[in-house]
Amino acid sequence: MDDIYIQRVLDGNQDAFRFLIKKYKNLSYSYAMSVVKDEFIAQEVLQTSFIKAYTKLHTFKRNAKFSTWLYRIVVNEAFKVLNKRKKDFLVYEETIVHDQIEADEMLSKADVDYQKYYINEALKKLGAKESLALRLFYLEEHSIKEVEDITGWNKTNIKVLLHRGRTNMKKILTMHFKDNEQTFDQWMN
């Protein structure tokens, strides 16, 4: 289906690109957020990435999936913005203060949405590469090969990032549950 719209865009139909934007904007945004950790900057990354994809669509070789090619643009742009921000500004770490949740209230909310929320919060606290690797592999269920294609990282690097990411995520989530009766392992099961 993508090939039809890609060809329409290449033939001069600018509106055909809207289909591709609608189809891929949510995952692209998710990947950008994994890296830059800021909604507004992620939106800018997305906008820039879609513009680049549109203007460079003629260079897309159809031997790979369009989504992989597009996600690679998003990931590269996100890291480019992240590196620029690090150079331009002092790193300011925002400390988020959460109200203490009662143990019984926490247990009543331990459903899928609750887990997703805390997993996403933990992902925000991880480094950009670890966060992206975990999101691509576990949440989006891409294979190691697909993660390799999207990010440009080698297989060994991806496995190291996944291992570190899991370890660091467990530490973050354990810290959250430290003052509660529930342990991380109980919560995940």
Image: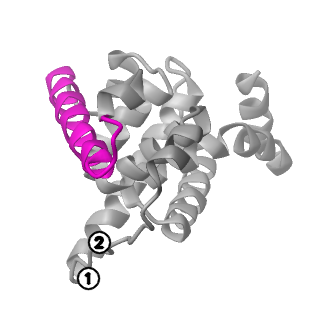
Q: Main secondary structure of the magenta part?
A: helix
Q: Is residue 170 magenta?
A: yes
Q: Residue at the spot x=49%, y=34% of the render?
A: 69
Q: Quadrant of the N terminus?
A: top right
Query: Can you give x and y, in whole percent of width and height, for residue 107 in the image?
Result: 51, 39
Tell me which corner region of the image, top left, top right, bottom left or bottom right, holds residue 125: bottom left
Query: Residue type at mark 1?
Result: Asp
Q: Is residue 97 magenta?
A: no
**115 shown above or below 48:** above
Q: CA distance from mark 2 to mark 1?
A: 6 Å
**27 shown above or below 99:** above
Q: Residue at the spot x=71%, y=45% of the render?
A: 21
Q: Residue at the spot x=46%, y=66% of the render?
A: 38
Left or right, 138 with reference to 153: right
Instruction: Name the residue nearer the viewer: 69 or 55.
Output: 69
Find numbered disc 2 in the image and state the secondary structure of the residue it sits on. helix
Can residue 137 be seen in the rendering of this structure?
A: no
Query: Can you give x and y, in whole percent of width and height, for residue 13 in the image?
Result: 84, 45
- Report which residue position mark 1 lands on: 88
Query: Can you give x and y, in whole percent of width and height, for residue 61 in the image?
Result: 51, 26
Instruction: Name the residue nearer the viewer: 40 or 75.
Output: 40
Mark 1 nearby-residue class (10 Å; few <14, some 14–19, many ≥20)? few
Q: Which mark is residue 84?
A: 2
Tell me which corner region of the image, top left, top right, bottom left or bottom right, holds residue 26: top right
Q: Residue at the spot x=25%, y=37% of the render?
A: 170
Query: Residue type at mark 2?
Result: Lys
Mark 2 nearby-residue class (10 Å; few <14, some 14–19, many ≥20)? few
Q: Quadrant of the C terminus?
A: top left
Circles 2, 1 touching at the beta carbon (< 8 Å)? yes
The residue range painted magenta reads 155-183
Find numbered disc 1 in the image and state the secondary structure of the residue it sits on. helix
**119 shown above or below 46:** above
